[in-house]
Image (cartoon, helix red, strand yellow):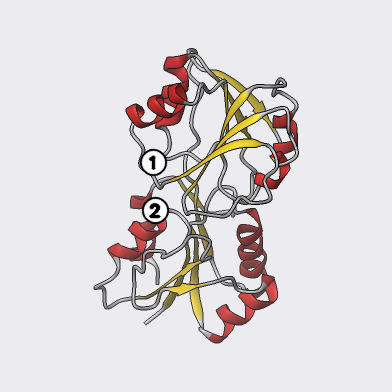
């Protein structure tokens, strides 16, 4: 029975793993980084935690005799995707990548596309009120902007004792509705939104709400790290696995 490693981090990875829970053809191992509290355990072989860089990933794939790697990580999880591709090439283990489609700008949207979080800061006027919808990894870049106000939202509750700029903190996990996002933006008098172009439906409502309210959205461009075998829907990934070997 071939061992298949799904490197997860998004809902689509869970969907792929769930499809094969009761199969007798493959042994599915779902790996989660463990960045969220109480992650959903999908399969009996779900593992939580990092691999320890390329060396740790190579060792895991070798010792577990992995026959196929499925990269279904977050679009901005560049390190693990890069490590997975390098490991695939070194160990000659095939890899396929799920690429979540990006959000597309409407002619009604007021977007500013930037390459980095530092670039995003340059577009914020002093004393502006900004909704940071970025996750928790990059908040420190905004901490010292004391002439700004931020609404910060993360999936899990975190401590922001060292965040020096004026702010309000909320937490919650999508999917969010347009009404949710409209109320948040109106009640907090939001001028700007800074977000990553993560794609998917769970957090797209903020884009629609900003469009309705005619607010500026500063969008961090997505890094381009793809394998040579990319898929843009889970159905195709599932079919590939079904046909594997």
SS of the residue at dot 1?
loop
Q: Is residue 146 above or below residue 154?
A: above
Residue at screen point 26% across, 73% down: 23
Quarter of the image holding residue 60?
bottom right
Disc 2 crowd, CA 10 A, few/some/many (<14, 14-19, 20+): some
Residue at screen point 41% across, 46% down: 172
Residue 76 rendering spot, x and y as whole percentages: 59, 48
Q: Is residue 149 left or right of residue 205?
A: right
Kindly report which numbered mark, 2 or 1, lies closer to the viewer in this rendering. Answer: 1
Quadrant containing the N terminus is bottom left
Residue 122 rendering spot, x and y as whole percentages: 75, 26
Numbered circles on residues, count:
2
Q: Which residue is mark 1?
A: 202
CB atoms of marks 2 and 1 within 8 Å? yes
The label number, if any, that marks residue 11 in the structure image = 2
Q: Is residue 153 above or below residue 42?
A: above
Q: Nearer the viewer, residue 72 or 227?
A: 72
The label number, if any, that marks residue 38 in the structure image = none
Q: Nearer the viewer, residue 119 or 30?
A: 119
């Amino acid at each position: 029975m071939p061992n298949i490693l799904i490197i997860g981090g998004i809902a689509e990875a869970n969907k792929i793993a769930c499809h094969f829970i009761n199969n007798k053809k493959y042994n599915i191992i779902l790996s989660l980084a463990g960045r969220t509290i109480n992650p959903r355990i999908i399969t009996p072989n779900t593992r939580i935690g990092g691999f320890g860089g390329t060396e740790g990933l190579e060792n895991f794939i070798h010792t577990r005799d992995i026959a196929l790697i499925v990269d279904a990580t977050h679009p901005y999880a560049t390190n693990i995707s890069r490590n997975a591709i390098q490991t695939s090439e070194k160990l000659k283990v095939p890899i396929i990548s799920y690429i979540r489609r990006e959000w597309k700008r409407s002619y009604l949207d007021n977007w500013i596309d930037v390459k980095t979080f530092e670039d995003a800061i340059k577009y914020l006027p002093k004393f502006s009120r900004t909704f940071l919808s970025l996750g928790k990894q990059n908040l420190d870049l905004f901490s010292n902007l004391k002439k700004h106000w931020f609404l910060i939202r993360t999936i899990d509750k975190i401590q922001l004792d060292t965040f020096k700029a004026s702010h309000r903190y909320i937490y919650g996990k999508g999917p969010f509705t347009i009404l949710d996002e409209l109320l948040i933006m109106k009640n907090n008098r939001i001028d700007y939104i800074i977000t990553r172009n993560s794609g998917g439906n769970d957090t797209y409502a903020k884009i629609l709400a900003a469009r309705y309210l005619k607010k500026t959205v500063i969008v961090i461009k997505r890094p381009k790290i793809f394998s040579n075998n990319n898929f843009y829907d889970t159905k195709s990934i599932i079919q590939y696995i079904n046909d594997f070997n």
